[in-house]
Amino acid sequence: MTQDASSPTRTEPAATLVETGRVIVGDNLTVMASLEAGSCDLIYADPPFNSNRVHGSTASEGLSFDDKSPDGLKGYLADVAPRLRDMHRLLSASGSLYVHLDWRSVHHVKVLLDDIFGSENFLNEIIWSYRTGGRTGRWFARKHDTILLYARELGHHTFNTRRGGTYRTRDLKMTPDGTPYKTTRNGPVHFHREGPVHSDVWDIPFLSTVSKERTGYPTQKPEALLERIVRASSNKGDLVADFYCGSGTSLAVAARLGRRWFGCDANPDAVAIATDRLKKCGRE
């Protein structure tokens, strides 16, 4: 079953070549097996975290996401491993994979990815730091996710340096054209107008319960997070794929930024939400 962002649901087989602008309902292992090797320029994967609980929606639709592995960690890894191998197969030589996890399984999955991609193609362990409610008196509050970044072929991969935020240097001044600078004994030192280069620690707010981005799908990620990923590791016209697409955040961002996109999810409700979202998506 496929859906695109401008037509009703219809039944047809998945294509051998990636048909961009599609969201497919189905097991991603089956979907990926039908696609041509090297056809994706960027893959974002936000698989289950192996949290052993059901994530409920805050929206009236009553959607939920079951994140339980009946066979524990061993079963979870056995399930995700062949999917990561197929993502490796689907990446172009210039492609990159971002795998979004948390503390429960990220270290185990990194071992799998080192084996699949080769440890030499590991680029970053990105820390997405956020502030949400909740605290405990038994350990430090867990307020970050981890995103593992791998290149298909180190040195051939697309990477666009990203900048933003404020400099921590004190006593900064501004030139008439808005360039920050600091006066030193050796004269003025000028800084980049767009801000410092982003590091592997990303302080991006968690999606608010009252945000206009909210779709009603649990575990939805903020567009600001995916925008940083898409801008950094793809160019206009590239194909961005998400085989655990959920509410379609990565696809909506890719569409808005002028990338081609393709996604799938096993949950028909997720595909319906993503499809509706993509119909309303603008373009930069």
Image (cartoon, rainbow, N blue to C red):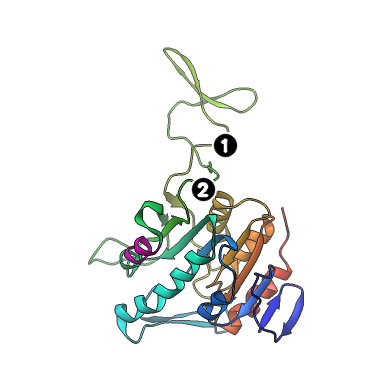
Which residue is denoted by mark 1 in the rendering? 194
Mark 1 or mark 2: name the one nearer the start of the chain: 2
Q: Which mark is residue 242?
A: none
| Residue drawn where x is 41% and y is 53% of the image | 121
Q: Is residue 171 above or below residue 62?
A: above
Q: Which mark is residue 156?
A: 2
Is residue 267 one of those drawn in magenta? no
Residue type marked 1: Glu
Q: Which residues are magenta?
A: 110-116
Is residue 114 one of those drawn in magenta? yes
User: Hey, which quadrant is residue 256 in on the image?
Assistant: bottom right
Q: Is residue 93 above or below residue 137?
A: above
Observer-nearest residue: 114 or 177? Answer: 114
Label 1, residues with CA under 10 Å away: few <14, some 14-19, many ≥20: some
Observer-nearest residue: 190 or 50? Answer: 50
Helix, strand or loop for disc 2: loop
Q: Position of residue 27 (x, y in %)?
A: 53, 82
Q: Position of residue 254 (x, y in %)?
A: 64, 59
Q: Position of residue 193 (x, y in %)?
A: 57, 32
Helix, strand or loop for disc 1: loop
In the image: residue 256, left or right of residue 187? right
